């Protein structure tokens, strides 16, 4: 095994463990639409095909499998934690409550929460039945920053 392969295995393993820890801390998970699920399955399928075509050694298959597992754990770690919002777009971890300058809650068939601050604006989607729990957490952790819009 080459040093680059060992480093990749360690990197993917570390990220998987980190994402699983965040997943364990989730209070409320985000919801995903059917289109998002289909796109994600297509991405995973693409990776499986690429691994099948390009892998030449057992190590290549291991790295490919770890990459796929990392993508899956990255996808399932989105939601609200006691520290803030965990996003798939933020590779490092969680948008902390003190980093958020504004929260907009839009209610339709699902709840859309848009966060603003010194980061790229992020939007999260939640199930409507989680509304009361979401609002309790937001009011406790980030009072006075919330705008609620019923559409």
Image (cartoon, rainbow, N blue to C red):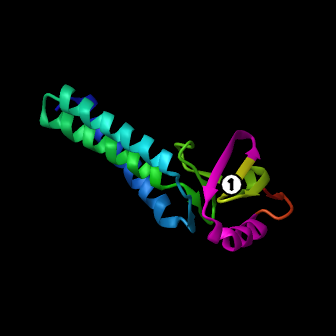
**Residue 119 magenta-drawn?**
yes
Q: Which residue is mark 1?
A: 112
Q: Which residue occupies 44% across, 53% down?
A: 18
Image coords of residue 35 (percent x, y):
49, 45
Give the structural element (helix, strand or loop) at label 1. Answer: strand
Q: How many marks?
A: 1
The answer to whether residue 129 is left or right of residue 101 is left
The answer to whether residue 11 is left or right of residue 129 is left
In this view, which residue lies farthest toward the left?
A: 57
**Residue 70 magenta-drawn?**
no
Tell me if residue 17 comes above or below residue 122 in the rendering: below
Say whether residue 48 is visible: yes
Q: What range is drawn magenta here? A: 116-141
Q: Which residue occupies 75% across, 51% down?
A: 100
Please name whichever residue, 8 or 74, is drawn nearer the observer in this view of the structure: 74
Image coords of residue 150 (percent x, y):
80, 60
Tell me if residue 24 comes above or below residue 104 in the rendering: below
Q: Which residue occupies 67% across, 73% down?
A: 133
Tell me if residue 62 comes above or below residue 57 in the rendering: below
Image coords of residue 122 (percent x, y):
67, 45
Instruction: Sort mark 1 into few (<14), some (14-19) or many (20+) by Cα contacts within 10 Å.
Output: many
Of the 4 image quadrants, the one containing the N terminus is: top left
Image coords of residue 66 (percent x, y):
29, 44
């Amino acid at each position: 095994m080459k040093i680059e392969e060992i480093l990749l295995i360690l990197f993917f393993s570390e990220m998987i463990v980190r994402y699983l820890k965040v997943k364990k801390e989730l209070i409320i998970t985000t919801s995903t639409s059917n289109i998002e699920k289909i796109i994600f399955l297509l991405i995973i399928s693409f990776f499986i095909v690429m691994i099948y075509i390009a892998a030449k050694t057992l190590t290549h298959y291991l790295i490919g499998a770890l990459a796929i597992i990392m993508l899956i754990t990255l996808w399932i770690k989105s939601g609200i934690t006691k520290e803030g919002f965990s996003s798939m777009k933020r590779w490092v971890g969680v948008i902390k409550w003190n980093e958020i300058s504004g929260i907009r809650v839009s209610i339709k068939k699902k709840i859309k929460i848009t966060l603003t601050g010194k980061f790229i604006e992020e939007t999260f989607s939640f199930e409507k039945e989680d509304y009361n729990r979401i609002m309790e957490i937001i009011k406790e952790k980030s009072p006075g920053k919330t705008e609620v819009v019923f559409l």
